[in-house]
Image: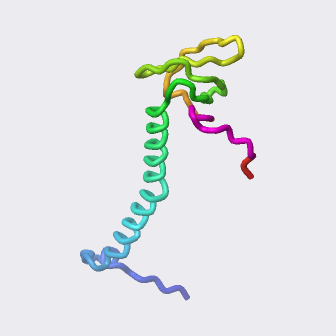
Amino acid sequence: MFFYALTAAQAGGTPNFLSLLPSIGIILVLVVAGYFLLIRPQRKREKEETEMRSSLSVGDEITTTGGIVGRILSVSDDTVVIGTSGDCTKLRIVKGSIARVDKKIGEPANTEEKK
């Protein structure tokens, strides 16, 4: 035989606050976990990307989201001009399309591979 527990609402009565407390607790735990697992890391990444793009300077080597590698020739508010090859092909790109800075000016080249 199966035994079913009837809640106050199923039995025809009005539910009291104490019967809803476990459900509210589970929802709160899920919201807090979602914040720490989803929202907080995303904000941290956005902050790091904004700092990286604001610290760009002439001479830095960058890689764009499209895979273009070049050296920064000039920097303005929203755009960057890069030189991409030995004959110095110039491209003007938006700062938002910069994926990473490969080498900052003044930093020594990393000759040792990361393991």
Answer with left or right where residue 103 lies relative to residue 33. right
Q: Nearer the viewer, residue 8 or 16?
A: 16
Q: Residue at x 65, y 12 (%)?
A: 89
Q: Residue at x 42, y 57 (%)?
A: 35
Q: Position of residue 63 (x, y in %)?
A: 62, 30
The quadrant the N terminus occupies is bottom right
Q: Is residue 16 above or below residue 33?
A: below
* Residue 80 colored in magenta in the image: no
Q: Residue at x 39, y 65 (%)?
A: 27
Q: Nearer the viewer, residue 74 or 52?
A: 74
Answer with left or right where residue 101 lies relative to residue 78. right
Q: Nearer the viewer, residue 10 or 78?
A: 78
Image quarter for residue 29?
bottom left
Q: Position of residue 73 (x, y in %)?
A: 55, 18
Answer with left or right where residue 43 lies relative to residue 101. left
Q: Residue at x 46, y 34 (%)?
A: 55
Image quarter for residue 98?
top right
Q: Nearer the viewer, residue 15 or 56?
A: 56
Image quarter for residue 59?
top right
* Residue 108 colored in magenta in the image: yes
State the predominant SS element of the stretch in magenta: loop
Q: Which residues are magenta?
A: 103-112
Q: Is residue 7 above or below residue 82?
A: below
Q: Position of residue 46 (x, y in %)?
A: 46, 42
Q: Position of residue 41 (x, y in %)?
A: 48, 52
